[in-house]
Amino acid sequence: MAGGFAELPVHRYNAAMRYHAKQGGRTKRLPTEQRNAASRNLDRMTAREIVVLMNREDRKVARAVGREIPAIARAVDAIVRGILKGGRLFYVGAGSSGRMGVLDAAECKPTFGVSPKLVQALIAGGRRAVTGAVEGSEDSVRNAERELRERKLTRNDIVVAITASGTTPYVVAAVNYARGHGAMTVAITSNRHTPAARPAKIVIAPKVGPEVVTGSTRLKSGTVQKMVLNMLSTAAMARLGHVYENLMLDLALTNQKLNDRGLRILAEASGKKLSAAEHALRAAGHNMRAALVILKLGVDAREAKRLLARAGGNLRKALGE
């Protein structure tokens, strides 16, 4: 064990982790598992004192993420490169970390109009784990490998491991499997020198320190994960052309609220009236990109779609911008 259990083959990882826990547990030395001196008397604090303390601790999160900007930017560039080559983005996590991945993946389709297959989330325990605990699921190495194998992982895919502790066997196995199959690997963790981080090509490890409730990594560590995932998906989709300026041009117009939002976006982007935006959107078959080309270039729907097709869907290019 002198060289660290991250160097063990994946199939031996579970046994090593259990043995290590019996010896006192390496995880106990992780910053996120230590006690927070400021919250030692949490159960005796007033409601105001508790929320003031939590707010003070949460202020550390944005600063910690800021220090990881270079790594986050590299991860965005890697995601864009992979997707342009036909790859997909996979989030892999367990428990609260897995749910963060599920949430971000689920929001990509309605926000950016991409296929649900482009951004996928794997959570230990499957769908049942989204709303409840599935006992033992995060310790399953075989499940992680099987789930990535079933999705026919390729060298163009990107696997983002999400684990606050950095020791979750399910997540570690996914990173090792992805690396072994030539896929790009990214780790988001609150503890840098851990089994999930070591095999990852890019490590994003904001240091947030001990939690207000010892070991409850749904707090600062969870907030870090949410912030980083927001950055990864939003920046990648912007670079891939799924926004125009800072406007959602590919949002799914699935209800009246979103339809009204789409009209306001078209009016804002084109400088035209809402009535003109509504007419263009109807003429374009509710295709937001085509509708904007109609509004900005004064062409009909057929020509707008032809320009977009010739530009490979690139809205800026279709508009001559």
Image (spheres, helix red, strand yellow):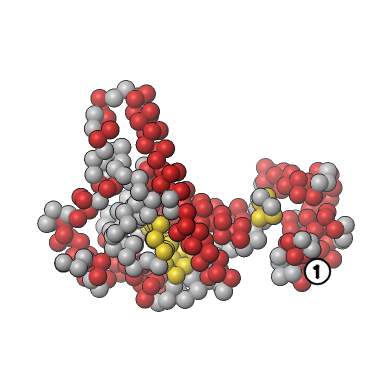
Question: Residue at the left extreme?
Answer: 23
Residue at 74 percent of width and 69 percent of height: 311
Q: Is residue 208 above or below residue 292?
A: above
Q: Is residue 305 visible?
A: no
Q: Is residue 296 above or below residue 198?
A: above
The residue that label 1 is drawn on is 306
Residue 128 place in picture, x, y as percent: 38, 54
* Depth order, front residue of 294/3: 3
Q: Is residue 100 left or right of residue 84?
A: left
Q: Quadrant of the N terminus?
A: bottom left
Q: Is residue 105 left or right of residue 180?
A: right
* Depth order, front residue of 94/79: 79
Count of numbered circles in the view: 1
Q: Quadrant of residue 91?
A: bottom left
Mark 1 is surrounded, within 10 Å at the Cα level, by few (under 14), some (14 to 19) or many (20 or more) other residues, namely some
Question: What kind of element bears circle 1?
Answer: helix
Q: Quadrant of the C terminus?
A: bottom right
Q: Quadrant of residue 287?
A: bottom right
Residue at 72 percent of width and 47 percent of height: 265
Q: Quadrant of residue 9?
A: bottom left
* Depth order, front residue of 295/6: 6
Q: Is residue 142 visible?
A: yes
* Depth order, front residue of 142/43: 43
Q: Is residue 22 left or right of residue 127?
A: left
Residue 159 place in picture, x, y as percent: 43, 66
Residue type at tag 1: Arg
Residue 233 place in picture, x, y as percent: 53, 56
Q: Is residue 48 above or below residue 177?
A: above
Residue at 38 percent of width and 73 percent of height: 179
Residue 226 place in picture, x, y as percent: 45, 49
Residue at 45 percent of width and 43 percent of height: 62
